[in-house]
Amino acid sequence: MATRPHAPAPQQSRIDPRLLEVLVCPLTQDTLEYDAEKQELISPAARLAYPIRDGIPIMLPEEARILER
């Protein structure tokens, strides 16, 4: 009986550190914090978390998650 190979575990996307140096919040123009576990870029000033999908930051405020206080 043939066994099926297991699909590899999904790897967390990594964002280029150089990209983090130039990206800013589109609303506040402040620097962002990278949350690797949640795959988000955090804007503490705007209280928003911008998602990273397939390694691409989605820098649209309407796509961001609102952070609780």
Image (cartoon, grey):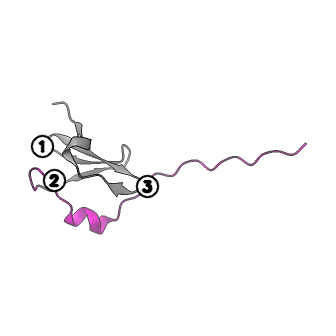
Disc 3 secondary structure class: loop
C-alpha distance separating marks 1 and 3: 24 Å
N-terminal of the pair, mark 1 or mark 3, is 3
Q: What residue type is labelled 1?
A: Ala
Q: What stretch is highlighted in magenta?
A: 1-29
Q: Do the CB atoms of the residues marked 1 and 2 lie less than 8 Å apart?
A: yes
Q: Which mark is residue 25?
A: 2
**Residue found 11% across the figure and 50% down from its top:** 27
Q: Does 62 sit left or right of 54 as displayed?
A: left
Which quadrant would residue 16 be assigned to in this image?
bottom left
* Whole-percent x, y for residue 22 in the image: 20, 66
C-alpha distance separating marks 1 and 2: 8 Å
Q: Name the residue under label 3.
A: 13
Relative to 16, is 12 above or below?
above
Which quadrant would residue 21 be assigned to in this image?
bottom left
Q: Is the magenta stretch mostly helix, strand or loop?
A: loop
C-alpha distance separating marks 2 and 3: 20 Å
Q: Do the CB atoms of the residues marked 1 and 3 lie less than 8 Å apart?
A: no
Disc 1 secondary structure class: loop
* Whole-percent x, y for residue 8 in the image: 62, 50
Residue projecting furthest to the right = 1
Q: What residue type is labelled 3?
A: Ser
**Residue found 40% across the figure and 58% down from its top:** 14
Q: Name the residue under label 1.
A: 46
N-terminal of the pair, mark 1 or mark 2, is 2
Q: Which amino acid does label 2 sit on?
A: Cys
